[in-house]
Each structure stands twice: as structure tokens, then as C-alpha cells.
């Protein structure tokens, strides 16, 4: 049956629509931190549908909220008052730390970043955007135009002039040998120099931890230092929290808070985890920025009642059960276990991350060169033993991406680490 579904997939869907595994997997249902395939095989899920299943599969509170809302009304568009949308916007504004916050809902992180770029360029009357090398911000025309990752950039055409800044990757590039303080100083000086060679940009957009790029990040405080330079020149700071938001990093509710010394971002984008699998994205911005558009705008499917009901239930569960704290505790344990199992593997360059957002970078032993073949082999070996993980990287890097639901237990963390240990051992050169 899976072979037949794969053949049908190939006949009607784009060739560039990537699938994991030599024998592609059909996931039919899930519960907690586990999913099952069409043959009934159970897997421990350490990737959560690319970080979308934030709390748990088939979370009862979310399932109940969706069912009850579906029995009333599913959708009406933003042309009508929408109680669940208003209630969720109020809650998000409260936890955002953005002053005088306004919230606009979209259907995805791509659309959220697209909206943030529209707001920033309209507010600043500039189409120049600063972005980070190794970054990823979505699949739309404008989001591809600011993506600093060649593997996810199918065209150089763009409505924006994009300039790329150093700093998103701590352990590679021209400043890698510096200590954290000197690294930040060098990146800031590079930013200042760049700004002396271009027209005033609209904004800097940055992921606090680069997701598709392999869960890389700068030292804490880099974007705070950037913020000071940007603020002096009126340039906005957009924090792309599509993957890092809602407590995934454990230490903070938002990834930008590791860089918050000089205040919050002007614009924050979010998606993925807040809907726990439902299609929810959005933008948080100061009122003067959010309200700067001088033409009509609506969202047909952004903020639809059924997705808002799911997100409200999901956010309430996350806060009531302190899943951020669980991500900090269990994630810290998992990182240490993975560092221990990787310590004697010459093909593991680095185990990095925080909370339940962990990257394992693989290289060919004795070199600093990426090993994408081994990354693919580890994914296959882990699947064979009942564990699903992801992969990523950019600019000749390859990394395993590990991001389980935030309700992961200690026992499940230990089990996943043991399976990954076996997968690494079985694929060692």
C-alpha cells in the first residue's frame, strides 16, 4: 500500500517536494510523543512534524477544542468579529513583551515573515533588508529572497535588496576562532561597516537559533549588540520565532530574550508550535508599525475560528503544565546524553542547542567537511530502531535536527538517546 501511495505521490506532486527515507513513511496517527505508520509500526517522534507538534500528538484539550468549534462554525474570515481570534491575540500580546502590541494572524511562518517584511518596508520606505548568513525564512518569493541558505533558495530574483550579515553561526566563518566577546565585537563592526556602504535598510530579520541551517546560533547578546546599532539608525529588528518561540529553548519563552538587553524586537513572527499541527502563524508588532499600512488588507484563512480554538487550548496547556521548564530540564539531560554518546565519534563535530532544540553536526572524520551521506544513513538507522529525527545544514554542513514535543519525559529522552547512539555507531566510517 505504501508503494502504491508513493507512486501516486510521484505522479501528481512536484519533483522538488522532498520526502525523508528510501522507503517513504506514511504516518497515520499519533499519541503523546509517539506516532504510527500505515503498517502499525510505532516510532518515538523527535521531530514533531518539523517542530509543529509542540505539546503532544492527539492532545485531548486541543482535540476537544477543535471538535467543539467545528460543531459551531469553522470559518468566517476577518471581515467579521471573531471571538477566539481576539482572545488568542490578547493572550499573545500579554506574553510577547512587545510594548503596545498588535497581533495579525496568518496561516504559516512563511506568510508571517512575508507580512513582517511588508510592514517593515512600508514603515521605513525602504526595500533593503539585512538578513543572516545560513538563514531560512520560508518558501514565498520574498522569503526566499532573504534566505541565506543556498539549499533552500531556488532563485536569485527578489523584490528586495538583501545584504547578509555575519554572526548566525558561532563555530564557522571568519570569526570562529575568537572568544564570544570578540566574536560579537567583530560582527558588530562588520555590521557598522556594511551600513556605511548601502542605503538605509528597513530591518534586520534573524532567527535566534537558525532552524533549517542546522540549529546554529550566535553567542547570547549578539542581537542585543546589533539592536543598539540598528536603533540608533531607526532600522527595525524582526525576530523570526517560527521555530524558537513558546518556550522550546527552555531558558526563555522567546528565543530573542537571550539577546534582550537592549529591549524587545520591533516585530516578532511566529507559527508552527502554537497550533500544535493546525495551520497558525502570525506577526506581533508595535501598534505604530502594525498600523502603518495605508491600503485595505484582510486574511481569508488567517485567524479562522477552528485554528484559533486549537491554539488557545494548546497555549493554555503549555503554560499550565510549564512545558518551557520541562524543555529546560529534559532538554538539558538529552543534550548531555548526546554529547556523551558522541564524545568518541570522530564524525561528530559538535552537539549544540538548548532546551528541546538540538543539533548534531556531522563531518567526515579527520576533516571539517560535511557528511550528508552519513546524516541520511543515521536517519535510516534511527527509523529502523523506532526513532524519527530531522536533518539540516547550510554552506557545506550537515546536521541532525532533534526537536521532540515539549512534554518529552526523561525516560523517552533516555530511550531516544540510546537509539541515536546505536544509529551513530552503525554508520561510523
Image (tube, rainbow, N blue to C red):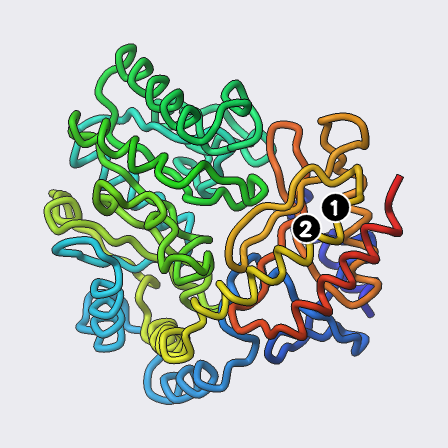
* Residue 355 higher or lower than 66, as above or below: above
* Side of 395 where 24 appears, left or right: right
Left or right: 33, with 25 as reference point: left
> Which quadrant of the figure contains the N terminus?
bottom right
The residue under label 1 is 343
- Helix, strand or loop at disc 1? loop
For marks 1 and 2, give the CA distance: 6 Å
Say which mark, if any, is on residue 219.
none
Query: In which quadrant is the C terminus drawn?
Result: top right
Q: Residue at x 29, y 32 (%)?
A: 225
Residue picked out by circle 2 = 339
Instruction: Name the secondary structure under disc 2.
Output: helix
The residue drawn where x is 79% and y is 75% is 41
Q: Position of residue 220 (x, y in %)?
A: 40, 41
- Identity of the residue drawn at 80% across and 44% down: 344
230 and 51: which one is in front?
A: 230
Viewer-side residue, 244 vs 424: 424
- 267 up-or-down from 81: above or below: above
Q: Is residue 4 above or below residue 218?
A: below
Q: Residue at x 23, y 66 (%)?
A: 89
Q: Are marks 1 and 2 in contact (CB under 8 Å)?
A: yes
**For the residue carrying disc 1, how many other residues have a C-alpha within 10 Å: few (<14), some (14-19), or many (20+)?**
some
Give the crowd class for mark 2: few <14, some 14-19, many >=20 residues within 10 Å.
some
Query: Is residue 224 at all visible to an observer of this figure?
Result: yes
- Work out whether residue 7 can be spotted: no
Q: x, y (%) of residue 87?
A: 22, 74
Left or right: where 23 falls relative to 397: right
Picture quarter containing residue 310? bottom left
Q: Quadrant of residue 394?
A: top right
Q: What percent of the width, then of the height, locates residue 427?
A: 86, 47
In the rendered image, residue 113, in percent from the top left (x then y), is placed at 36, 45
Amino acid at each position: 500500500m505504501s508503494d502504491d501511495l508513493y507512486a501516486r505521490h510521484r505522479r501528481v506532486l512536484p519533483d522538488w517536494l522532498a520526502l525523508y527515507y528510501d522507503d517513504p513513511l506514511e504516518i497515520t496517527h499519533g499519541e503523546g510523543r509517539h506516532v504510527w505508520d500505515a503498517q502499525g509500526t510505532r516510532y518515538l517522534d523527535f521531530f514533531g512534524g518539523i517542530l509543529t507538534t509542540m505539546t503532544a500528538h492527539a492532545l485531548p484539550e486541543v482535540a476537544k477544542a477543535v471538535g467543539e468549534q467545528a460543531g459551531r462554525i469553522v470559518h468566517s474570515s476577518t471581515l467579521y468579529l471573531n471571538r477566539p481570534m481576539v482572545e488568542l491575540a490578547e493572550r499573545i500580546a500579554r506574553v510577547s513583551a512587545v510594548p503596545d502590541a498588535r497581533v495579525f494572524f496568518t496561516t504559516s511562518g512563511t506568510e508571517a515573515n512575508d507580512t513582517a517584511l511588508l510592514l517593515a518596508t512600508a514603515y521605513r520606505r525602504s526595500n533593503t533588508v539585512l538578513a543572516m548568513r545560513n538563514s531560512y525564512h520560508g518558501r514565498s518569493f520574498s522569503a526566499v529572497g532573504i534566505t541565506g541558505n543556498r539549499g533552500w533558495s531556488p532563485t536569485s530574483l527578489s523584490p528586495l535588496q538583501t545584504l547578509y550579515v555575519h554572526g548566525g553561526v558561532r563555530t564557522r566563518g571568519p570569526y570562529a576562532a575568537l572568544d564570544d566577546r570578540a566574536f560579537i565585537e567583530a560582527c558588530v563592526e562588520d555590521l557598522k561597516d556594511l551600513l556605511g556602504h548601502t542605503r538605509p535598510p528597513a530591518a534586520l530579520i534573524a532567527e535566534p537559533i537558525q532552524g533549517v541551517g542546522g540549529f546554529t546560533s550566535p553567542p547570547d547578546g549578539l542581537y542585543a549588540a546589533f539592536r543598539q546599532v540598528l536603533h540608533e539608525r531607526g532600522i527595525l529588528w524582526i525576530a523570526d520565532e517560527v521555530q524558537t518561540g513558546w518556550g522550546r529553548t527552555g531558558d526563555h519563552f522567546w528565543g530573542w530574550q537571550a539577546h534582550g538587553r537592549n529591549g524587545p524586537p520591533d516585530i516578532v513572527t511566529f507559527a508552527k508550535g502554537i497550533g500544535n499541527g493546525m495551520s497558525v502563524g502570525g506577526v506581533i508588532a508595535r501598534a505604530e508599525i502594525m498600523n502603518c499600512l495605508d491600503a485595505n488588507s484582510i486574511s481569508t484563512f488567517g485567524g479562522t475560528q477552528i485554528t484559533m480554538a486549537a491554539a488557545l487550548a494548546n497555549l493554555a496547556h503549555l503554560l499550565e503544565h510549564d512545558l518551557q521548564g520541562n524543555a529546560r530540564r529534559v532538554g538539558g539531560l538529552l543534550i548531555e546524553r548526546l554529547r556523551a554518546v558522541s564524545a568518541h565519534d570522530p564524525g561528530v563535530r559538535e552537539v549544540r542547542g538548548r532546551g528541546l532544540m538540538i543539533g548534531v553536526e556531522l563531518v567526515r572524520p579527520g576533516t571539517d567537511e560535511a557528511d550528508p551521506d552519513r546524516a541520511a544513513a543515521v536517519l535510516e538507522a534511527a527509523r529502523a530502531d523506532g526513532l524519527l529525527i530531522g536533518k539540516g545544514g547550510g554552506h557545506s554542513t550537515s546536521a541532525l535536527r532533534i526537536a521532540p514535543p515539549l512534554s518529552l519525559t526523561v525516560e523517552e529522552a533516555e530511550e531516544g538517546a540510546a537509539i541515536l547512539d546505536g544509529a551513530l555507531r552503525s554508520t561510523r566510517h
